[in-house]
Amino acid sequence: MNRRWFAALAAVPLALSVAGTGAAEASPTPASAVPAAADTVDTDGVYVVQMADLPVIAYDGSTAGYAATKPAKGKKIDVTSLAVTRWADNLKSKHGNALRTVGATSRLYDYAYTYNGFAARLTGTQAKALRSTAGVLAVTKQQTYTIDTSTTPGFLGLTDKGGLWEQLGGTKGAGEGIVIGDIDSGIWPESLSFADRVDANGVPTRAATGKLAYQQIPGWNAKCQNGEQWNNSLCNQKLIGARYFNEGQGGNAGIDRDRPWEFNSPRDYNSHGTHTASTAGGNFGVPVTGKTAPLAPNGISGMAPRARISVYKALWSTQAGDTASGSGSDIVAAIDQAVADGVDVINFSISGTSTNFADPTEIAFLFAADAGIFVSASAGNSGPSLSTVAHPSPWITTVAAGTHPRASLGDVTLGNGTVMTGASTATQDVSGTLVRARDVARAGVTSGVAALCHSSETGAGNVNDLDPAKVAGRIVVCERGGNARVDKSLAVKQAGGVGMVLVNVPPAIGGTLADFHSVPSVHLESNFYVPLNNYVLGAGAGATASIHGYVDTKQPAPFTASFSSRGPMLAGSGDLLKPDVIAPGQDILAAVSPSTEGDNFNLESGTSMSAPHVAGVAALLKQRHPDWSPMAIKSAMMTSAYDVRDTVATSTKIFRQGAGHIRPNSAADPGLVYDNGFKDWLAFLCGSSSAVGPNTCGALKKAGFKTDPSDFNVASIAIGDLAGTQTVTRKVTNVGSTAATYTASVTGLDGVTAEVTPAKLTLAPGGKGTFTVKFTRTTAPIGSYTGGFLTWSDGTHAVRSPLVVKPVALAAPAEVKATTAGASYDVTFGYDGAFAASPRGLVKATETPGSVVDDPTDDIDTAPASSLSTTTVTVPADTTYARFALFGSSGAGDDLDLYVYRGSTLVAISGNGGSVEEANLVNPEPGDYKVVVHGFAVTGATAAFTLNHWLLGSTSAGNMNV
């Protein structure tokens, strides 16, 4: 495996050049740095290849003969200009040249605008050869991405007198001139949420006799791509762009083969994209019809109702419509095209990495953000588990999901008078005999399977799990899990049931959701599971229940939705807070593709629904403040946010909500912002990953950029390893219209003090101020987070930032190397008290020579025996530390990898580029371990190596003093 150091970005100024070079390096863009995606070369498949040159959006003219294409601040690229065309053609030519060097010619995509590279179908051998080709930064096997699946404008305050909508000209002006790009499952263009005409009453209509309500946006580059059940006449002055991307799925033929129900066009089969687009920028006052009409008597609206919509379909639905997924190559192509088209905001309600700042999608978004495009991404739906938040990169705004005051509720009244309340959209009351699905199984179906209520669409052999003779006319208790919630009510209907009680199974607390079911239904939380079952079992054939649904518009809110992913995030060692903010994401009413029952609107839940709320609000803020950067907009949302109502510890709350719930009207006038940009992002990557080369990182440090991730200038502070004391630095800008004096205050942070210096900042309009915060542990428990807030106030604005800090016992170098008889190093202590250090070792390495040949499959699981060398190492019972290492091989270009197994379980791996590998085990279990050297890439006939291992006991070897 390979991770490549590279240099490339001339956006880093001359002061950041590598000192002492008389001539330019043999690099297409000297004195610069492009962050590279991590290599993942594997077996045959589709690969995304990143090249070294700058993409169009960032190219600064540093290559002779090619004019700069990076647009000025606030401007967009012109894809028709000669400079852009020539540079893009130059990049694409190099893509073809690189591909031909490995014996391949066909590319699925060329990326040129926000990501320089291409996608191609390659053999493992070709991919392996390509990564060592000049000009190639990374070769990444494409991943699969999935979806993260009214009253909210009022809840957010947009409709308030003097609110953000009114500031921007009301519903006929809010979002005007801003383009929201929605990368998703497509769009249903006939929806009134995307009509460009209104009737005599100002209500959106598709009638040709309606009055045109929108005008063309000058300089817009997108097109409306023809396809299946789609022609370019379906776009209009509201829906101004629509494209689809499926080459990573095998093109049209692949979709026809694998998903014949789908549309090879921008048309949305799944509904997810239609829902997110209408939430972000759908028309105001769209009349709601069908089953959801009682929920919105005054119609629905997107957050930025006058924004234009451009869609990029890169997700493809299952037949049941329960989810949609897409390939990494298509996703990057969609991002690249959205930037080329000139969108202002991107909504990305799609899953993503939780551990990697530099996968192709995150890197594409980095360049998009540098071009002034705000990116709103869903945090993920893996809650309530901790450390599940996705999209960790600081140039993205990562959005968690919360509740809002409107709740669709239902009561289940048992025959004994007990009332159980849950989520429901039931519009018809039903009563009848109550049975458990596990007690009414069809012959041959176990009770455990029947409890899940599979319909004929999902049941084994396409047969319903339930016995119609035992279900007809009855209300059925179904258990959550295994299949879609709506599939369960379909099973009840198919078997003749008249109602369903869906209940979560302990110990899980999965939240309850108001779906539209095939029969009147109520979804209950897991605390009702035992009493509900006890009642049915006790009452036997006499068990009865009634179901009644209703809407409550005064529910306490917001709370964190149970499904919303949360921190602390896995990437960055706890030194950056994610999610950034929280927004409404549960039971959101918006437009959808028509259902089989003709419904054009539906309630959906997920961080997929919260992200477009933030995307729409970002569009409003960008319209209100066209000179603000995407990070200034993000900062404004964060510092003006407020807490959710969850009754948990402050640190727990912060990891759920980030800075808090968005408050758009306050975000329009935040007072101060914490801004950051491209060079800050590079410095952050220097301290948190290996995606930026050491020369560039060194130059950034010399230029004054801090590389400790805790010093990244975001509107939050996170320290994942506070050893006693740590000081972080932040910079703020006064975006107000008058000079102001701000005073700092800190709340919370139990057991940790926070000293702000200076404690006051007086700033003129546009003025910048720098301050530090010194954190010192006093009584906070070691190894646990504590949370609080830093607020700067001038009497008018309260600029609040969340703080999360985890004290640790000590901080010391992971490794100390010395070639003399002694060495010294610093240890920082996080507590007061005794400390004693005792030596273990020194021990000499045990050396085992070996050799391997090249593995043509590049996969340890399929490698021939000659490509593997296995050494058995017996680890004694008192071993406290074991290390296994390679220091190279006989071939300069060899790439050997190291695997350590305990029995059949892989316990350690080292897969760096080249043959310098190291795997470590702390307090390993005693016994035999298999250490396998894999010939991932061998340049000659064989690769000879020496395997070194050290087994450190619990006592001193008598040859070292501390």
Image (cartoon, helix red, strand yellow):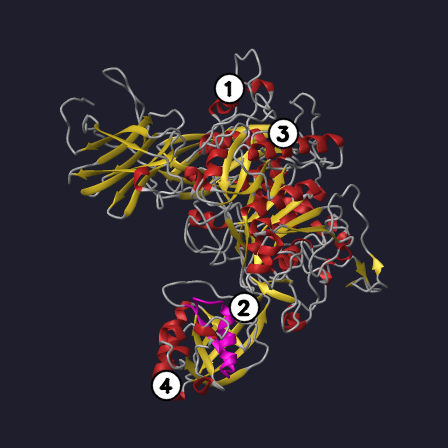
Residue 711 highlighted magenta (yes or no): no
- CA separation, marks 4 and 2? 28 Å
Q: Are marks 1 and 2 in contact (CB under 8 Å)?
A: no
Q: Which residue is mark 3?
A: 763
Q: Which residue is mark 1?
A: 702
Find the distance from the CA under tag 3 to the CA under tag 4.
Answer: 72 Å
Residue visible at 73% across and 37% down in the picture: 79
Q: Earlier in the sequence, mark 4 or mark 2?
A: 2
Q: Mark 1: which secondary structure? A: helix
- Amino acid type, callout 4: Ala
Left or right: 836 in relation to 219: left
Residues at marks 1 and 2, CA–CA distance in whole angstroms: 56 Å
Sequence-wise, the earlier of marks 3 and 4 is: 4
Is 783 placed above or below 297 here? above
> What residue is shown with label 2?
514
Residue type, numbered disc 1: Lys
Which quadrant of the view contains residue 235?
bottom right
Give the mark toward the camera: 3 or 1: 1
